[in-house]
Image: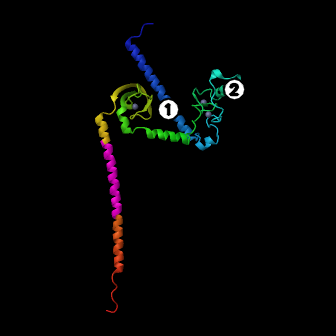
Amino acid sequence: MAKLTEAQRQQRAAARARREALEAEERDRRDTERREMWQREGMYLSWEEYQAGEPCRGCGEPMRDDLGDWPPLLRLTEEEKREYEVAEERFRERHSDCKSSRWSISGSRVTHCFGCCPPPPMGPQQIKKLSELFASWPSAEERKKDQDAWKLTLTCDHVVRYTQHRENSYVSTSVVDCPECPGRRGVVHSERIGPAYSDEAILADRGAADRERLAKELAAAKAKLQRQQKNAAATQRRIEEIEKQLKPVPDASE
Ligand SMILES: [Zn+2]
Ligand SMILES: [Zn+2]
Ligand SMILES: [Zn+2]
């Protein structure tokens, strides 16, 4: 076979990138549809239901069996090997057409399917940890100085700007919202442009944030003054009413 010319090679790479972007877009669409369906059909377990031991609403298996994680496959005893095979067979029967990967809860051997089984609910501990994590994040303004802008070409041929942390050497998402098309689009090509925000822009932002805060404080102070003025007017009227009632009674003897 003749060797590919540089132009042919580039053409093939471009065609492959487009095909992969379309596949990512399709996967994303299916995932979104599935999550919406689970939501609509009430298939997610609440924390209370999960705690009470309700089975998975996707496959009907227990969410967790608390048997402990499987030991490494090479260290299974003969009995464990048989149990493992039975569990494998059971999974294959239930999910013969799924082609999805699996998940299981830590400390448990029963496996669930990403295609059929809604993930377990978050517990109060997990929610607490997550909110602590969010709270420890630098502010949006602080993060700006470490952000790079990228230029993404999407499957719809629209070019959009994308920002992410400078440490990333490639764009970490394969699908983004296109402001000009409905739905999300696969990323065909990405190119780093450089720092997303100039120092001046960051300073200007900080100034804008300060101004916005001051404007809010001013509005709150004005509203308070207005309330106080209304109260004062009402008190004033009340004083006048009382004074009227206190007018000296004309002397009947005169
Ligand atoms: Zn399941
Ligand atoms: Zn499945
Ligand atoms: Zn588009």
Where does the C terminus fall, quadrant-wise?
Answer: bottom left
Q: Residue at x 36, y 68 (%)?
A: 234
Q: CA distance from mark 1 to mark 2?
A: 37 Å
The residue under label 1 is which amino acid type? Arg
Left/right of residue 114 with respect to residue 89 in the rendered view? left
What secondary structure characterizes most of the magenta part?
helix
Residue at 35 percent of width and 62 percent of height: 228
Give percent across and percent down for residue 53: 65, 40
Residue 127 versus residue 83 in the image, above or below: below
Where disc 1 sits, the SS reads: helix
User: Picture coordinates of residue 35 (x, y %)?
Assistant: 53, 36
Badge 1 residue CB within 8 Å of ligand 3:
no
Colouring? rainbow
Q: How many marks?
A: 2
Cβ at disc 2 under 8 Å from ligand 1: no
Q: Looking at the image, do the residues carrying marks 1 and 2 touch, with CB atoms under 8 Å apart?
A: no
Q: Quadrant of residue 37?
A: top right
**Mark 2 packing: few (<14 Cα in 10 Å), some, or many (20+)?**
few
Magenta span contains residue 224: yes
Q: Which residues are magenta?
A: 207-229
Q: Is residue 210 magenta?
A: yes
The local crowd at label 1, few if under 14, some if 14 to 19, many if 20 or more residues have their Cα within 10 Å, is: some
Which callout, 1 or 2, points to the residue nearer the camera? 2
Identify whether 201 is placed above or below 151: below
**What residue is shown with label 2?**
83
Q: Quadrant of residue 200?
A: top left
Residue 250 percent across, percent down from the top left: 33, 87
Question: In this figure, which residue is indicated by the disc labeled 1?
Answer: 29
Q: Looking at numbered disc 2 in the image, what kind of residue is underneath it?
A: Glu
Residue 124 sits in which quadrant?
top right
